[in-house]
Image: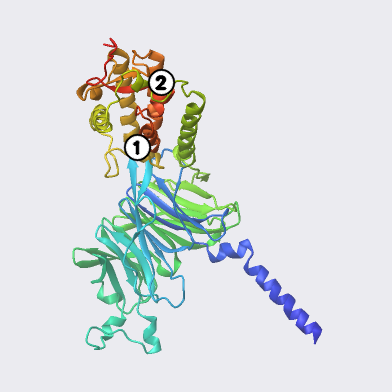
Amino acid sequence: MQRPLKKWGLLCLAWIAFLITPGYAAQVQSELRTASADGNLWVVVRNSKVPGEWRLLHHGADMEGPYARVARTFQYRPKALSASGNRVFVLFDPPLPTMDSMDLVSIEVQRNEATGTYYELPLSGWDSLASVPFLDGFGGLVSTTNGPVVLELPSMKAAKGITRTRGGGQDDPLDEGARLLEQRAYQWTVVDGPDALQRLEQQRVVPSQEDRLALLSGSPDGTAILHLRSDSTWSQQTMDFTYASLLRVASGENRLIFALTTSGLDPESGRPQFELVMTRGGTVLRLGTYPIPEGAWGIAGLGARIMVLSTDEKTQVLVSEIDSLTGKQRPAVSWAAPPLEVQEWIHLPVLGMMVVAALLAIIFLQPTEPPDLPLLMGVQPLSIGRRLLAFGVDLMPGIALVLLLGIEAPRTDVLPIWNVEFALSVPGLVVIGSTLLHSCLSELWFGRSLGKRLFGGCVLASDGSAPRASALLLRTFFKGVVLFAPILAVFCLLSPARQGIPESVSRTVVADTRLTRKMPNSE
């Protein structure tokens, strides 16, 4: 009895090892999820560095190179992707078998014209939409300007004697047919579809054409038929291929692109081939045959570009473009992170370095005179309220410059002084830089900035004399540090002479000209 048990045990181990081999995983997950619209291409790939994690990559048509950004990461592979305008919709299978709905979320991509970088809204997380209320008979996800649309194929539950009912408990036999559901105002509503497809299981939604819903179905003889919805009527077009031969479908420039199975092998690699065809008006244009990539692969259209995407053993995305006129395929290139993506890891350390430098400057450059020296010398510090008002006036030229240059702040706050996204920090950087420049020059020439002049303040040395130019420059530098890290301004409240980090390091004080007995001839 021991030998048969040992033999079966070895067979089970061999079967488990076969299931977890990379080759088998590539076969199971051979389709690369893609979606594109309005110059934005979205691709879902596995993260080889983090087991069980998936990444949503975003590629923009104006990135000027083979670049892609990691827009989001998640722990489940999406069931479907769809794109409309600047928004992508992501549909997930239920995490538990007992759940009877699928989660649908979306994000919107924005481009900062000042820097050419992208960011997503919301900045973290997703916009959660109404869950898809069924699991059986899923026929695909698409989207229009009105919202996402899903196709529910004829219910598989009907074969088990389970029927859907309308309000009141009355059975509706037509309710067991295929249905197009569109989400509006966080609710799913039924959209009229072609009557001939009510009972047909061989159908799927394909990317919308000029915001018109599109369906692909198989005729009784197996030929593929394209159905397009215009207003409330449906038209159909017979395609020059069979429905069963369809492997992948994508869209670009209001045309559909299909990848079809072929019987031949690629003469160079010996791999199976697929044929690429696309719609052109009322006809179909055949571009040519190409080898099926190894691993997960898909097709995409981005404007006039047609791309074949695949993943290598490191799950890097390889992109090969195909000329839509000649059908010639270019060599595959690997996507890389855009050059400005370094702001994701360098922005915060730079801020931390500036904060540490400010604290070290206080330790090593702390003046030897007592902290209440300005008060002893008859210098009265400007009140906190008037100092804040003066600072607000000093910010106005920078805000005017931002408005004049047309730099749009993507958030509702006027001055995004600090954000971990570099694209969101440009308006604040412009305001800070211009404020430091004009206030420093004004203090060098006149001893006070525009805001201090209006509210009766000036910059003096700690002993009440006119400050040196080097002290004003040092004060301006550390003033910029405080503007990047406003929490450091709390040191101003701890000093009896209202001296913050810039004043402590430069041995200066912001004085009240109305109360100070000794005034320098700084103007």
Quadrant in which the C terminus is drawn = top left
As drawn, 462 above or below 292: above
Location of residue 199 (image quadrant): bottom left
User: Which residue type does callout 1 highlight?
Assistant: Ile
Residue, disc 1:
417
Left or right for 235, reference 263? left
Residue, disc 2:
507
As drawn, 449 above or below 352: above
Quadrant in which the N terminus is drawn = bottom right
Q: What element carries label 1?
A: loop
Q: Which of 243 and 19 is in front in this view?
A: 19
First along the sequence among labels 1 and 2? 1
Q: Is mark 2 on a helix, strand or loop?
A: loop
Is residue 114 in view? no
- Residue 349 drawn at (x, y percent): 49, 37
Mark 2 Cα-neighbour bin, 10 Å: few <14, some 14–19, many ≥20: many
- Residue 496 drawn at (x, y percent): 36, 29
- Residue 208 drawn at (x, y percent): 30, 59
Res. 173 mark? none
